[in-house]
Amino acid sequence: MEKNALRELLGKVLGIDPDTITDDMSPESVESWDSFNGLMIVTELEKYFNISFTVDEVINVKNVGDIERTLKARGLEF
C-alpha cells in the first residue's frame, strides 16, 4: 500500500480530499473523524491488509502518523 493509498482510504471514510491529509490530522482536527468513522477506519484497514488490530493498537492511535507507525510495526509496507 502506498502512502497515497492510505490517504485515499482515509479520505473515503472521512469524506475529505486525500491530498489534504497530513500525519498530524486527528479526530480533534477533522470534524468528520468521530467515533463511528474511527471504527470505519479500523474496519477498512483490517479488510485491506487482512489483519486484526489489537485493542491496544486501536486505543493508542491518536492521528494519521500513528496509523502509519502501527502498520509499519506489523511489518506492512505502504
Image (cartoon, rainbow, N blue to C red):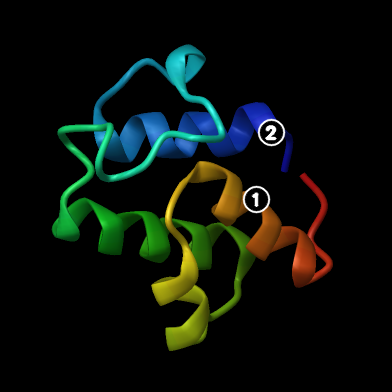
Q: Is residue 63 above or below residue 71?
A: above
Q: Residue at x 22, y 51 (%)?
A: 37
Tell me if 3 is positioned left or right of 20 in this view: right
Rate crowding at label 1 as few (under 14), some (14 to 19) or many (20 or more) other CA atoms within 10 Å: some
The picture places residue 33, in percent across and down from the top left corner, at 23, 43
Q: Is residue 68 above or below residue 5?
A: below
Q: Residue at x 51, y 86 (%)?
A: 54
Task: Name the disc covering residue 68, or none.
Answer: 1
Residue extending farthest to the bottom is 55
Q: Residue at x 60, y 71 (%)?
A: 50
The picture places residue 8, in percent across and down from the top left corner, at 49, 29
| Precedes in sequence: disc 1 or disc 2 | 2
Tell me if 17 is positioned left or right of 37 in this view: right
Element marked by disc 2: helix
Three-letter code, disc 1: Glu
Element marked by disc 1: helix
Task: Name the disc covering residue 3, or none.
Answer: 2
Q: Foreground: 1 or 22? A: 22
Q: Quadrant of residue 38?
A: bottom left
Quadrant (top left, top right, bottom left, bottom right) of the N terminus? top right
The picture places residue 22, in percent across and down from the top left corner, at 52, 26
Q: Residue at x 40, y 75 (%)?
A: 59
Three-letter code, disc 2: Lys
Rate crowding at label 2 as few (under 14), some (14 to 19) or many (20 or more) other CA atoms within 10 Å: few
